[in-house]
């Protein structure tokens, strides 16, 4: 688990240096996997109706409810590696 956490933290740094910005769906997937891996299931109230970006992020994270943190971390690391080429 300690090795996975190091990989996860490194992937969070690596995502900032991607050669090009991923499409919006991929960005939401990255966000949701990161949040699920670092914080667990979604918490807090749903953003307001006119907060489109906040609502999209909330819903993407909400879809991962119940996914174990370790699984989310593994998927996040794999996705970042794939994007880095």
Image (spheres, rainbow, N blue to C red):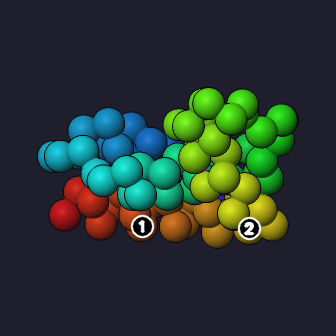
Camera-side residue of 24 and 64: 24
Please tell me whether residue 22 is drawn above or below residue 1 in the rendered image: above
Residue 75 placement (x, y as % from top left): 52, 67
Left or right: 82 in relation to 59: left
Find numbered disc 2 in the image and state the secondary structure of the residue it sits on.
loop
Q: Image quadrant for the C terminus? A: bottom left
Q: Image quadrant for the N terminus? A: bottom right
Left or right: 65 in relation to 22: right
| Residue ID for mark 2 | 67
Question: Separation of disc 2 and disc 1 at Cα?
Answer: 16 Å
Camera-side residue of 85 and 3: 85
Residue 18 placement (x, y as % from top left): 23, 45
Q: Residue at x 69, y 63 (%)?
A: 63
Left or right: 26 in relation to 31: left
Disc marking residue 78: 1
Q: Classify 10 Å Cα crowding around label 2: few (below 14), some (14-19), many (20 and above).
A: some
From this viewpoint, is residue 18 visible?
Answer: yes
Residue 66 placement (x, y as % from top left): 81, 67
Give residue 71's quadrant in the image. bottom right
Q: Classify 10 Å Cα crowding around label 1: few (below 14), some (14-19), many (20 and above).
A: some
Q: Residue furthest front?
A: 50
Find numbered disc 1 in the image and state the secondary structure of the residue it sits on.
helix
Please tell me whether residue 29 is drawn above or below residue 66 in the rendered image: above
Residue 42 placement (x, y as % from top left): 77, 48
């Amino acid at each position: 688990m300690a090795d996975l956490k190091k990989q996860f933290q490194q992937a969070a740094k690596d995502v900032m240096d991607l050669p090009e910005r991923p499409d919006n769906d991929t960005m939401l997937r990255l966000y949701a996997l990161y949040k699920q891996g670092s914080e667990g299931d979604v918490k807090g109230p749903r953003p307001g109706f006119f907060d489109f970006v906040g609502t999209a992020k909330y819903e993407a994270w909400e879809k991962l409810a119940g996914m174990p943190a370790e699984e989310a971390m593994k998927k996040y690391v794999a996705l970042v590696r794939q994007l880095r080429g």
